Amino acid sequence: MGNDTDVIAALATAPGRGGIGIVRVSGRNLGPMLEQLVGKITPPRQAYYSEFRDGMGGVVDQGLSLFFPAPKSFTGEDVVELHGHGGPVVMDALLARVVELGARLARPGEFSERAFLNGKLDLAQAEGIADLIAADSDQAARNALRTLQGAFSQRIHSLTEDLVRLRVYVEAAIDFPEEDIDFLSEGRVAESLDNLVQKLDSLVADAGQGVLLQEGMTVVIAGRPNAGKSSLLNRLSGRDSAIVTSIPGTTRDLLRERIDIDGMPLHIVDTAGLRESADEVEQEGMRRAWEEISRADRVLFMVDSSESRGVIAEQIWPEFFARLPEHQHLTFLLNKIDISGLPAGRDINLGGVTKENKTYPVLRLSATTGAGFDDLREHLAECMGYRGTTEGLFTARRRHLDALTNTQRVLRDAAEQLRTSGQGELLAADLLQAQRLVGQITGEFTNDDLLGEIFSTFCVGK
């Protein structure tokens, strides 16, 4: 973390050549610097045509200067923007002049960091800025804007207020026993706690979809050689990304493609076929395949229905279930129905595919003709939590979801403890822990290391 009393400066537009380039400066008492740059302190929040001058009074460039006095600025400090011609030489000269007048070059994300530290926006909103800049679809941009505008933060603040209100009541019962508040017999605490859990469950569901909207869902295609995995990748991506032949084991390395389903990004990974092999290259391909399977949000296990006649168990590699991570979400795809003659669609006959009383969805399709692919896309959208509309949703990050799921665990433990022991001191401690976990999202409870990690991913000049 840098010294927040420094004057900082950076190029706020993308590097390279353009019609306009912007140098942004933030710090305390920038009036004298502005006066040396353009000859006067310009009116607040008005674009002022200026000549930008060097230390000898010569003109470096001409354009617009804007002055945003504190606290009515993005960072909460004085902010100056110089809008000049967007050539690298001109921008470097302007930036050098600002540094000559006492500024230092800003770190990535330092302007947004100062906005957070000065109370202009919370941490979730600051991350919304980075998400908006990085958005690569209309839907992602709309949701990131909602986060920046505070849609996510408002729900976090509402949850925090409920936690604080319940903590106050419980701690009052502990600290003032003469008032004879029996919060157990009243049932008020248990009811409030249940309402908190329900409110949190809804927020976790929306945040989970927010993470998928921001980061996407990783889907790994697995199965035996020549089951049609590469054909599936090509069909989903809409182009010939992978080599397809009748020779088993064509894919040795990982192939990746990104697709969108209803505005939500999917990261598709094609892997080497799983089988017994003495070939070192193929063994390495399978090792990488298993690494991807362990990290995937969902695995699509492909079966050649022309050989199995729809009996999935015959096509499963014997070690597959033994090595499949316990948490892994799995879908079976019966491919090559154009050869086997099976109808396209979802299959309710699981063909013996069970594990520890779990059943897995099965879809029948043809990667060659495209039959059954509408059902597959619908299934993947359902796996991502798609609800037919993304109106009102926001972007979220894994750290937000981790904090919320940890809060779920704490509150459920608190509810169980209340039912079994009824100890107010333990309940109050759980509520405080939950409040701290939720506060990590907006930055109410955080540390410098976390802030440094978050803002280091931002653009320089933002």
Image (cartoon, rainbow, N blue to C red):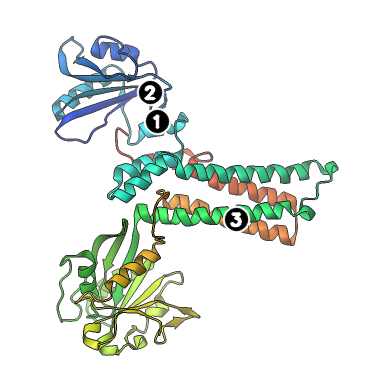
Residue 176 location in percent, x, y?
80, 41
Residue 95 location in percent, x, y?
23, 24
- The image shows residue 363, relative to residue 215, as above or below, that is below
Q: Quadrant of the C terminus?
A: top left
Disc 2 to disc 3, C-alpha distance = 44 Å
Residue 92 location in percent, x, y?
19, 26
- Looking at the image, can residue 452 be seen? no
Disc 3 to disc 1, C-alpha distance = 39 Å
Q: Are marks 2 and 3 in contact (CB under 8 Å)?
A: no
Q: Residues within 10 Å of mark 2 (few under 14, many from 20)?
A: some
Residue under circle 1?
2
Give amino acid for label 2.
Asp
Disc 2 secondary structure class? loop
Residue under circle 2?
6
Q: Quadrant of the N terminus?
A: top left
Q: Quadrant of residue 33?
A: top left
- The image shows residue 44, relative to residue 402, as above or below, that is above
Residue 387 as seen in the image, left or right of residue 228: right
**Of the image marks 2 and 3, the number of the one nearer the N terminus:** 2
Give amino acid for label 3.
Val
- Who's the residue at 31% across and 71% down the image? 376
Residue 142 as seen in the image, left or right of residue 284: right
Q: Are marks 2 and 1 in contact (CB under 8 Å)?
A: yes
Residue 181 as seen in the image, left or right of residue 248: right
